[in-house]
Amino acid sequence: MTRILYWNIEKFAANKMANPSTKRQRGASMTAAQASAARLAYINTHWGITAGGVLSRPDIIVIVEVATGYDGPGILARGSGPDGALALLVALRAVTGNANWMLVPPLQTGPREAVAVYFDSSNLVFTGPWLWPGGVGPAIAPLAPGVFGPALPTVAYAAPFAGALPVAAVPAGTINTGTAQDQLAACTDFTYAAAHMNAGTAVNFGALRTPYWVSFAEMSGGGALPVVRNISLFCIHSPASAAAGQYLTDLADLAEITDGIAANEVRVVLGDFNVNLLNNNATKTRNASYTAMAANYALGIDRPGGPPAPIDGWLGYFATHIKRGNGSTYWTTGTQTDYYPGYGYIGSTIYQNFYSIDNILARYGAGVAAGGPMTDVTVLNGVVGSRYNVIAAPVPGNPPIGTYDLPIYMAGAPFAAPAAQAPAFSAGRRSAFNGWNNYGRIRSTSDHLAIVADI
């Protein structure tokens, strides 16, 4: 079993958590440097989630929206985004006391964006799936199986990514056997699936962000041979526009996502799809943009049954996107009642029906070693804490409660002890809710909540 934590950390860069500025942080009585340290402390709580009181750290962490300059897909990310990714690697190793945490050097996926993937190399081997030619890239494809010719040149990453990956070679029983892990790379190039009219040809994503494919071999335990199964992760950040629905549908047309899954392979498609999971209708049916992918992949966050009556509060169980502070509420008035767990902070202050836009999907090969099904999917919510267990089960409509516990990252009454219905409005309560040490710090970190699942 491998535990994956995915998070869209808004505009992720060095200043998010390591800002040296002594200028005053907007909305807080502290410097920007102190504020960034507070954000890092909040981020670090996610590596200490528990289940039944037992520490349950993730094995793989995926961060999308890593800032970068733009030169083209597959080229090494540059600027403050990768600086932040490396700073988080240092923090991750320190907080967990585990020097085996590694970082796949982030590559550009589209204008101003890259992806950072961290993994615990104690039991996982990075297998690419592509090769690193040196310099700034771009990454290159390995020779196809059965194709003979001179070996493709590979080079270890130079500074600042030297040491971010293990130097050990990939073992037998998986892809890129014999190549050093620090000479491998993620993949940002894709082809059309066999069932598509353009089967086998390269997909042109134009100005859209490409998917980001990374692969791992899961060892039998303690990093020992043999390889038990292969893991393919496809990290997605769909366009934040009307094109998002079609982008999600088109993922099923990619050969790497759809065709030829191995018996001992699990494929995971995760990310910010920018498509709301549920339709804005009376019965809250599942959005049709998920239909093509759902033919082969199980959704981690899904609509388990009909919504309760009244629906207020139910949607908060599915939510992964939160509003800006000035558009958020955590109180009840004569005209508005806010219910646990979403109260009035879920959604978007710009877009309607925009709350459940992140997800994790999984597909398993036919062999026993592939494992499955995906379990213990949990939205990690620092505003009210996770799991969502304030209202006694069964909750009407059977929404996703989750398995893993993340502490509430807010202080004082009533925030430290959420209730089924938010308390009455007061000006002081509004100020306390939006204060830096409460919702202000959480929302300053990201407009998304993280998701964790066992695959």
Image: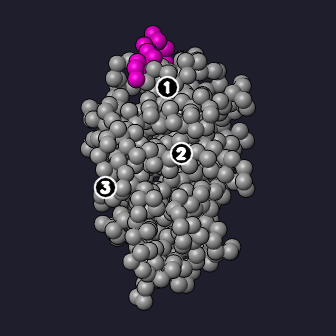
Q: Which residue is mark 2?
A: 44
Tag 3: Cα neighbours inside 10 Å, few (<14), some, or many (≥20)?
few
- Give the residue type at disc 1: Ala
Q: Which residues are magenta?
A: 143-160
- Using the numbered discs, state the Cα–Cα distance from disc 3 to disc 1 in whole angstroms: 34 Å
Residue in front for this viewpoint, 366 or 182 = 182
Q: Give yes or no for residue 269 being in the magenta stretch.
A: no
Judged left or right of residue 433, residue 219 is right
Judged left or right of residue 28, residue 214 is right
Judged left or right of residue 140, residue 205 is left
In the displayed structure, 104 sits above or below 315; it is above
The percent position of residue 200, horizontal first and vertical second, equals: 40, 36
Residue in front for this viewpoint, 103 or 109 = 103
Residue 297 is at least partly visible in this image: no
Q: Earlier in the sequence, mark 3 or mark 1?
A: 3
Instruction: Look at discs 2 and 3 and give the one toward the viewer.
Output: 3
- Residue drawn at 59 percent across, 70 percent down: 417
Tell me, for residue 26, which label it has, or none.
Answer: 3
- Residue 273 position by quadrant: bottom left
User: Mark 2 falls on what kind of element?
Assistant: helix
- Using the numbered discs, state the Cα–Cα distance from disc 1 to disc 2 in whole angstroms: 19 Å
Q: Earlier in the sequence, mark 2 or mark 3?
A: 3
> Which quadrant does the N terminus fall into?
top right
Instruction: Look at discs 3 and 1 and give the one toward the viewer.
Output: 3
Q: Which residue is mark 1?
A: 164
- Residue drawn at 36 percent across, 57 percent down: 28
- Give the residue type at disc 3: Arg
In the displayed structure, 153 sits above or below 189; it is above
User: Mark 3 falls on what kind of element?
Assistant: loop
Tag 2: Cα neighbours inside 10 Å, few (<14), some, or many (≥20)?
some
Instruction: Look at discs 1 and 2 and give the one toward the viewer.
Output: 2
In the displayed structure, 420 sits above or below 96; it is below
